Amino acid sequence: MPTTTDTQELIAALTPEETAEIAAEIAHVPEPASAMIEALRIVQRHRGWVSDQSVVAIARMLGTSTAEVDSVATFYNLIFRQPVGRHVVMYCDSVSCYVMGCDQLRVALQEKLGIEPGETTSDGRFTLLPIVCLGACDHAPAMMIDEDLILDAAPQKLDAVFGRYT
Amino acid sequence: MTTQPLTERIAAASGASVDLAAYERAGGYTAARQALTTMTPKEVQDLVKKANLRGRGGAGFPTGQKWSFVPFGEAAGPGHKYLVCNADEMEPGTFKDRYLMEFDPHLLVEGMVIAAYAIGADRAFIFLRGEYHGCARALKRAIAEASAKGYLGANAFGSGFSVELAPHLSGGRYICGEETALLNALESRRAQPRSKPPFPPASGAWGRPSVVNNVETLCNVPAIVRNGADWFVGLGRGADAGTKLFGVSGRVKRPGLWELPMGTPIREILDVHAGGMQDGYKFKGLLPGGASTDFLVEQHLDLAMDYGTIQAAGSRMGTGTMTVIDDSVCIVDLSRNLQHFFAQESCGFCTPCREGLPWLEQLLADLEAGRGQPGDLDVIATNAQLIGTPGNTFCLHATGAIEPLASAMKYFRDEFEAHIREHGCPLRTAEAAAAGGR
């Protein structure tokens, strides 16, 4: 994780685009700090993850402490406080997918990508993570790559699926 | 009149999302117009009470009654009132709200306009699962379309009533589905449940009167306004009113989701709609409405899926989407999977849940791996009772975690004992062991 605390970088930590998007979210809520999760999601959408600098920058923009922002950022599993690959692969490991073979899917994913859950491929293309029920239990096992829900994710389908993500 | 008010438009759209034009052709937004321009909020509340609409998120609380707790006028004090739709569908095995929002988003928007009017809320949020990107796109489009038509926002339908509606995408965590944790998450705090009372209608989002309703609950409201309370009551087959989205997943021939009369027997859902078990697999048990509901077994299959009947059998109808367990599934390892979920998703605020659930997961993993000791089942049972007794923990997360475990030990005791006696899982083949349960 980057460790620089250079002031210029902190100020530059939010782009004008990010700042404008966060400001639009603040308009929906009674106090700026109530847009914190939206702010974290916005930064992550632009950068893939939320760095220490971004935490500081969000805290400043929302008028709250960095500790508060970090306590929220680390509570929620969809906020990444470490860099991830260009694509995040999430396989469901909840009960219906368990019954329909998510363990076999996980093993296939690990073999195909050459990484364990929580790791990123050396070319920075994929990060592999478990996820809870994706609400697609009638098409289990289910997985998600970035914003795409993948149904009936049989191990033999993985090559074709991965081909769509460069 | 229709017998499938929730899904008839989706069926007609054959795979596409129902757009505004199609929704209006099917009578969409006439109910909201009718409610806002010809009824008082109290009349809407009374209608929904009379229709006996109960919460479809799992708890089954009477919706009209919940609305009636919201103060009006001076009693409400200065500031906003909030309607929050709980669209944080994270109960494992549940896949009904995603379907409604993705394929008929205007139905939820219309239901929320009516509900907001009934409680006098000028602000409304859809608290949406962070992974539901398709729903987010559909709802944002629907909100923009409805706003452009004047069905939402300032002076909706020219009625003088105004309500703003915005989606909030969750940062993730199952506990956000608990309504007070959801309110904390909506405020961008850590999603820890709040002390109750006060309940949300007295003090909810940002300390203001608020109502939290599930997606399917709100989606029932337009048709109740349009067709009346008696019609809605008549849709149910037993004590409960209306239809219900019932789902089946697991090794059945046709996993899926169907809108059926409330009170449809389990066996009918499994055999007629889901097509029965896949060839080569036998029915072993089911979770009737999500991971936090007690197992039901063969002897329960003729029970009606309604709140009271399933509760009398020692379980809960929950979300009404069942997970079927077949004879190839080891109940001990399945229990480990379930406890892994609940341990991971504990918010960590109180000790029995934060420390107890991982311990139970570990004990179950030990049983599965052949490290079980005589006496382990008593340790599990004792701790399950301590952790699962309401009042021993701050919210009902741990209670929900224990429901499938305690019932698994009740109905499948011999399987648990065999794991100790045979120093491991009788079902587990060498191949499965190599693939590795976690």
Image: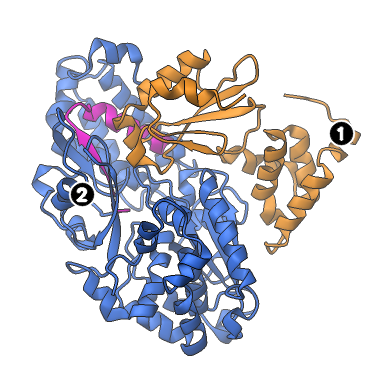
Chain colours: A orange, B blue
Task: Read off the residue under disc 2.
Answer: B273
Does the rendering let one see residue A7?
yes
Name the side, left or right, on which B137 lies relative to B367. Answer: right
Does the rendering let one see residue B360?
no
For this rendering, which residue is in front, A71 or B249?
B249
Q: Residue at x 13, y 32 (%)?
A: B282
Circle 1: is it few (<14), some (14-19), or many (20+) Cα within 10 Å? few
Which quarter of the image is occupied by the C terminus of chain B?
Answer: top left
| Image x and y of residue B205, in percent | 57, 64
Residue A68 drawn above or below residue B218: above
Q: Is residue B330 magenta?
A: yes
Which quarter of the image is occupied by the N terminus of chain B?
Answer: bottom left
Task: Read off the residue under disc 1.
Answer: A9
For this rendering, which residue is in front, B105 or B411?
B105
Q: Which residues are magenta?
A: B319-343
Q: Secondary structure at mark 1?
A: helix
Residue at the limit of the structure toward the right, as seen here: A8
Q: Residue B5: which quarter of the image?
A: bottom left
Q: Secondary structure at mark 2?
A: helix
Name the side, left or right, on which B233 lies relative to B280. Answer: right
Q: Are marks 1 and 2 in contact (CB under 8 Å)?
A: no
